[in-house]
Amino acid sequence: MTKHLETNKNLNSAAKELRRNMTPEERHLWYDFLKDYPVQFNRQKVIGEYIADFYCKKANLVIEIDGAQHFEHENAEYDRKRTDYLKSAGIEVIRFLNKDIKYNFTNTCKYIDKIIKERISGE
């Protein structure tokens, strides 16, 4: 069960901009897998005080695609706080590196599919 999170409407324009300017890896995952997935996903979804790369409400799942900047201390700490915040609301967060999308796309998609099916069947 997902706890209701008050959405920060001030982030809507930033989320819209991020949708327009997706990274190549986000674009690949969206257009080649998530866009037509049988369970609905939203991209660059505002959840509370954060913007998630991809969000599936039915599975209470966020998918994040991380580039090299996510390994810098400040960004890693921000990611940890965001993950903790989302988990406190009952939302699972899974992360992939850009290289997972570039070089291991099929297995990445299989893993996402497996997680979604597990989370939905556990309802």
Image (tube, helix red, strand yellow):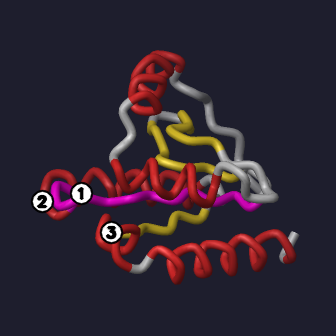
Q: Where, by quadrant of the figure, is residue 103 drawn?
A: bottom left
Identify the residue shown where x is 55% and y is 61%.
87
Question: First in sequence: mark 3 or mark 1?
Answer: 1
Looking at the rendered structure, the kind of residue marked 2 is His
* Disc 1 element: helix
Judging by the rendered image, the residue that carries numbered circle 3 is 97
Judging by the rendered image, the residue that carries numbered circle 1 is 77
Identify the residue shown where x is 63% and y is 37%.
5
Identify the residue shown where x is 46% and y is 38%.
51
* Disc 2 element: helix
Figure quadrant of the N terminus: bottom right
Labels 3, 2: front one:
3
Judging by the rendered image, the residue that carries numbered circle 2 is 73
Callout 2 touching callout 1 (CB < 8 Å): yes
Is residue 44 magenta-colored? Answer: no
Tell me residue 93's x, y (percent): 52, 64
Dot 3 crowding, Cα within 10 Å, few <14, some 14–19, many 20+: some
Q: Is residue 69 left or right of residue 27?
A: left
30 up-or-down from 42: above or below: below
Q: Where, by quadrant of the figure, is residue 17 drawn?
A: top left
Labels 3, 1: front one:
3
Q: Which residues are magenta?
A: 59-70
